[in-house]
Image: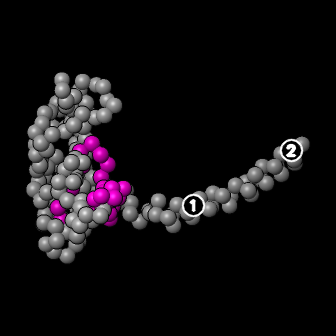
């Protein structure tokens, strides 16, 4: 009896191995997983200075930070490098992926994609995405989180670095969690 069980177990593994191998090849070759883009280290170059994390805030919301070992320069002002650029701020949404541009935000918006210069500043701000060369930003309004019935909601402000050509630099992102009363209360 043990021999039959052993044969079934070996046969099952033999059938499973090609499937696992195919999945591994597909995920690495299709761009779903690129270990070379992962850093596996804590990036402490940026530190939020205001407001304190998890505090109760209102809009307009002024967020400030400090950064070191990064030169702040405007878009298209110099050749792109990992050590120079500007900031992109995402409110209550995931940032674009490493090495990608803001064009990804509009990837499913045919109207925007057909319009030269889109996504522009107005388009991005309507989606709670801001860019700046300052170490601070005032966010005029933060809408309530859809589907969240809590009177006090948690919002997240995420800052990432962009190079001068408009591509996200690495996977580093700094998050600031804040609390805010639901709009209309």
Eyeballing the image, is 150 above or below 140? Answer: above
Where does residue 84 sit, x and y in percent of width and height? 18, 67
Eyeballing the image, is 158 above or below 101? Answer: above
Eyeballing the image, is 64 above or below 163? Answer: above
The residue nearer to you, when weighing 142 against 40, is 142
Residue placed at 21% from the left, 54% from the top? Answer: 123
**Disc assigned to residue 24:** 1
Query: Can see residue 123?
Result: yes
Reading the chain from its start, which is encountered first: label 1 or label 2?
2
Residue placed at 83% from the left, 51% from the top? Answer: 7
The residue nearer to you, when weighing 46 against 122, is 122
On the rendered image, what quadrant is the C terminus found in?
A: top left
Query: Can see residue 87?
Result: no
Residue placed at 73% from the left, 56% from the top? Answer: 15
**Disc assigned to residue 2:** 2
Real-space Cα separation, disc 1 to disc 2, in angstroms: 32 Å
Where does residue 44 sit, x and y in percent of width and height? 23, 53
The residue nearer to you, when weighing 12 against 99, is 99
Q: Which region is colored magenta? A: 84-112
């Amino acid at each position: 009896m043990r021999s039959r069980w052993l044969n079934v177990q070996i046969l099952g593994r033999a059938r499973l191995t090609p499937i696992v191998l195919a999945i591994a090849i597909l995920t690495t070759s299709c761009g779903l997983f690129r270990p070379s883009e992962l850093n596996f280290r804590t990036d402490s170059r940026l530190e939020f200075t205001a407001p304190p994390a998890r505090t109760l805030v209102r809009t307009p919301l002024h967020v400030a930070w400090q950064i070191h070992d990064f030169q702040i320069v405007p878009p298209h002002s110099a050749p792109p490098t990992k050590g120079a650029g500007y900031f992109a701020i995402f409110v209550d949404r995931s940032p674009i992926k490493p090495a990608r541009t803001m064009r990804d935000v509009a990837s499913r918006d045919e109207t925007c994609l057909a319009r030269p210069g889109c996504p522009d500043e107005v388009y991005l701000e309507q989606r709670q995405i801001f860019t700046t060369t300052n170490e601070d930003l005032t966010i005029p309004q933060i809408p309530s989180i859809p589907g969240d019935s809590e009177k006090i909601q948690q919002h997240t402000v995420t800052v990432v670095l962009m190079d001068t050509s408009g591509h996200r630099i690495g996977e580093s992102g700094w998050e600031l969690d804040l609390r805010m009363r639901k709009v209309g209360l």
